[in-house]
Amino acid sequence: MHARAPHVAVVGGGVSGLAAAHRLRMLLGPDARITVVEQADRLGGKLRTTELAGVRFDVGAEAFLHRKPEAQELINEVGLQDHVVHPTGAKASVHAAGRTHQLPAHTFMGVPASVETVRHMLSSEGALRVEMEPTLPPVELQGGDVAVGALMKDRFGSEVADRLVGPLLGGVYAGRADELGLRATMPQIATLLDKGVGSLLAAAAMMMPAPPQPRVARPPVFASLANGVSSLVDRLAEVARPEVRLGLPVRVLSWLGHGWRLEIGSAATPEYLECDGVVLAVPAPSARKLLHELAPQVSAAYGKVEVASMAVVALALPPGTELPQRSGILIAEGERYSDRITPFTAKAFTFSSRKWSHYGDPVILRGSVGRHGETALLQRSDADLVKAVRNDLHELTGIKAAPIDSVVQRWGGGLPQYGVGHVDLVDTIERGIADVPGLSVAGATLHGVGVPACIASGDAAAARVAAHLLGRVRR
């Protein structure tokens, strides 16, 4: 055990890094020195709450899966449980094949559990393909991975892939079904197929929750925080009490034989930070660079993870503006206006004032722009994006009201793409890092892009470094 209090550097001040800092504080005690180094000018990463017409409004992640326990447990741990809010009962919808439909129930990430639940969205031929899917030869992954889009088209035809699965995956990953891998994006379905459930329809049916017991309310799927999701970031920084260094990129990470050295700041005037352990909670491109010399195989695996950029366009509309009675609309790729010429710019809208009851006036909503590879779209000016999103809103809902305020938040390279073989890449990363003393990795690249998965990765990374420092892991 160290004679002096240990010093751990957490590289990356997003929710993964701050969850790691909090857990390190719990495990190493009040005397440990914890330094969070973040190249941006603020903490929070993809959790960002801004002011929109005087209202605190999330322009990054706006909610988290309540069914996964990590976020709720951490919120309870840091005393924010009284601030948790849940969505209203408003249903989501999807705009596909020129029409807006309520998003079908009894689907798993768009994979139907029965033909009846999706029949209203499909042609008669498309519905027949779904109905007949269980009669096809069984799906056999044989331990391998497959692109979600290819599998859906092979089993159901193109309509389910384009009108349901594609819009949902685009909403979560800013990616395309043809490029995303089944094992990383739908691991539950992949596991059932591995176990011999040969039909996608049957696998989705097995994923459906049991009917609620009489007089027992089904637990909410999603939750948020009334003052914005980034209030969790603020509280973690307050509780963990790290030394925070903002606006400083980490340029070089070196193992000294007895500890670590970080070169931070500009190349012309670098600073050096020496520490006993490091948690790397950064996006894949940054991890690839920092690990190039230290762990070439790990670096190479990170290098194979592509990232997508996107933007959130937040609009505050005048009080009294009537939003649709829906929580939002997903927009299928390739959809056009009723003129059959003009393409949609947004891939989704969230009608925040309908989705969350804690918002009062003004009426607020957000449009999401950008899928993997759509770089030209995001090179447009803020004003142009606001105009395009307003036009999309008018086309979908008839709303013409001019916003009283707007915010455009761009997320450059913010969303890792879970491509075919992603699970194997993560395995390579984690096996390689296990051989490096006092170093661990966390973040959305690994086991999920949602807030609970990021928190879990930060917890695990902190536990590994703390165990090393406390002498529980042999070098």
Image (cartoon, grey):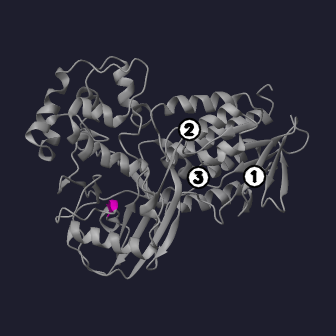
Where residue 251 is drawn, which disc sits there? 1
What residue is disc 2 on?
304
Q: Secondary structure at mark 3?
A: helix
Is 94 on the left-hand or right-hand side of 250?
left
Label count reads 3
Judged left or right of residue 413, residue 298 is right
Q: Nearer the viewer, residue 399 or 385?
A: 385
Type of amino acid under label 3: Val
Which of discs 2 and 3 lies nearer the camera? The answer is 2
Q: Which residues are magenta?
A: 346-350
Image height of 209 relative to 473, above or below: below
Q: What amino acid is labelled 1 in the image? A: Arg
Name the secondary structure under disc 1: strand
In percent of width and height, residue 373 lies at 44, 51
| Extreme residue toward the left, this view | 124
Residue 216 visible, this orientation? no
